[in-house]
Image (cartoon, rainbow, N blue to C red):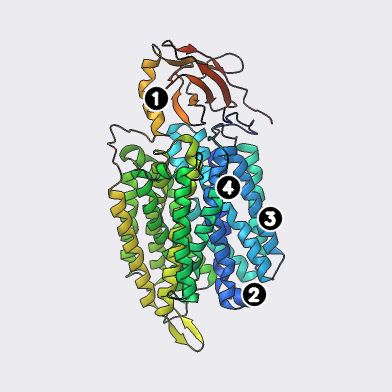
Amino acid sequence: MTQTTPDRPHGRPGGTAVVPVLAFAGIVVAVMQTLLVPVIKDLPRLLDTAPSDATWVLTSTLLSGAVATPIMGRLGDLHGKRRMLVLSLAIMVVGALVSAFTNDLLLMITGRTLQGVAMGAIPLGIGLMRDMLPRERLGSAMALMSSSIGVGGGLALPAAALVAQHSDWHSLYYGAAGLGVTAIALTLAVVPESPVRAKGTFDLPGAIGLSAGLVLFLLPVSKGSDWGWTSGTTLGLLGAAVVVLLLWGLMELRVAAPLVDLRTTARREVLLTNLASIMIGVSFFVVSLVLPQLLQLPPGHGLGQSMVVAGLCVAPLGLTMMFTAPVYARLSARYGPKTTLILGMLIIAAGYGGGLGLMDAVWQTVVTSVILGAGIGLAYSSLPALIIGAVPASETGAANGLNTLMRSIGTSVSSAVIGMVLANTADTVGTAEIPTLHGFRISFLIATAAVAVGLVLALFLPGRRPSEHPRLRASSEEDANLERAEAVLNGRGFRGRVLDAAGAPVARAKVTLIDRHGRQAGATVSAGDGTYALAVPARGPYVLAARATGHGPLASPALHDGGERPIGLDLSLPGETVTA
């Protein structure tokens, strides 16, 4: 039987601190990503190297993050999402310390490569929320976690700029390491391990194939402007990427427990959401590239502001994303995540359209940041809900990891395309190439076009009438089982009461049915007297996982003999604080 027994948590499962702690971990990852933005233009001097070599400090993080995201998600599904979250943060801390103690280019690239592994924290955090939280809290929690990349980036820009302007730039890495250690400690103290496990073993050949394909694709995308888009190196690597990814896909379809379930990924809702995610990634990165440069360039090309002022003007982008999380939860509960995704994209399009004429004063850039932050926040918040509603509980880590990868591909393509546009429209001043307002406006038009493509994709997503889905569901399997709960009391399944350590009934406990393959087969919530009822799809062994606020989680093996009468099974939850 597949592994389903949960680790004993170190904290209080489902407690109010879980969501902010997981969101904080996401913000730490975003800070790591944004860390070097204020000193990008100075990297060749700081590392005593050529500009083309200095860009590897950024490219290495991008590549390792793209590779690590789906792999860490799958490992989390197999071996525990909290365990992999802590591991990814620990690798990030090691990488930050490596970078903090060196000026050597190769060591700096090594440190940044290790830091990129932390990108897996976002899908792992979303998966933990799905496994632990009651449905009424899931929507806003996932929205906050999904938006944490933007929130962390927006908050980190002015802070990193202040440090870089007044202190040794290595201090940025010390700060990132400190934040990583804090996130690890809080996760171990507060976040319990999920009892949900996927079937099978880790698909090592699949991981190697996907890694090779992603590197072969993202490397020429990132370096194409330096190598030349029609050069043999660029075209050769892109061609190799197509071949490797096609062979990888064929192999994954034949593996019993693949790294990425391509059949699930090919579902209409999952596929369209992932494609729309690429477009949102493009639009998010354009504003991150354009506004800081516009603000800092000298008058005639920009607004002539300091590094710190530029960071403060872009900060509302992340802050607005954070504040849209509770708004998203209310809108999604009433209209569904598809509607909020479409609304977010419309707001992004309005922000970029208006931004074309708002490049003449500092306050105008703040307005653009606020509008785009609201739209990107709504769009990003909608993505995990759409993915989670279409995949089994045991695959949430891998599925959200793939979705996060799609966003990363969008930002990579955005970086390459916008970099080429700004270079081709730049003015030569002395020996320097300085971007122009014309180039910035073309960049905004490209972002608007990407959003338009994403909007068309979102319109083809399956719709849900609000009357049928008054609140965000944790999964489609759970919806079906909840509708059948009444019938279970007189049919095939399990029934009983959820009790606390003293034998008192526990109301509103989440009870999940996990089959022999580690997949969620049903879920329900206990009634006021602690009673629950769950139907079973077939005879055989199961695990009943129960959790409730203020109690430790429980995973109880159960065997159904195929009889037509429900089997009685009471579930006794451990006390409020459970030690390892």
Q: Position of residue 481 (x, y in %)?
A: 39, 25
Say left or right for 223 vs 455.
right
Tell me whether the residue at label 2 lies in contact with that at label 1, contact meaning CB atoms closer than 8 angstroms.
no
Task: Say which residue appears at 72% left-offset and 65% top-offset.
Answer: 101
Q: Distance between the Cα atoms at labels 2 and 1? A: 59 Å
- Indicate the quadrant containing the C terminus: top left, top right, bottom left or bottom right: top right
For marks 1 and 4, the one nearer the N-term is: 4
The amino acid on which the numbered mark 2 sits, given as a three-letter code, is Leu
* Disc 1 crowd, CA 10 A, few/some/many (<14, 14-19, 20+): many
Residue tagged by mark 2?
46
Q: Distance between the Cα atoms at labels 3 and 1? A: 45 Å
Tell me whether the residue at label 3 lies in contact with that at label 4, contact meaning CB atoms closer than 8 angstroms.
no
Residue tagged by mark 4?
204
For marks 2 and 4, the one nearer the N-term is: 2
Q: Position of residue 349 (x, y in %)?
A: 32, 60
The amino acid on which the numbered mark 1 sits, given as a three-letter code, is Asn
Judge depth for marks 2 and 3 and give the one in front.
3
Judge depth for marks 1 and 4 and give the one in front.
4
Residue tagged by mark 3?
94
Residue tagged by mark 1?
481
Q: Position of residue 200 (x, y in %)?
A: 55, 36
For marks 2 and 1, the one nearer the N-term is: 2
The answer to which of 416 and 289 lies nearer the viewer is 416
* Disc 2 crowd, CA 10 A, few/some/many (<14, 14-19, 20+): some
For marks 3 and 1, the one nearer the N-term is: 3
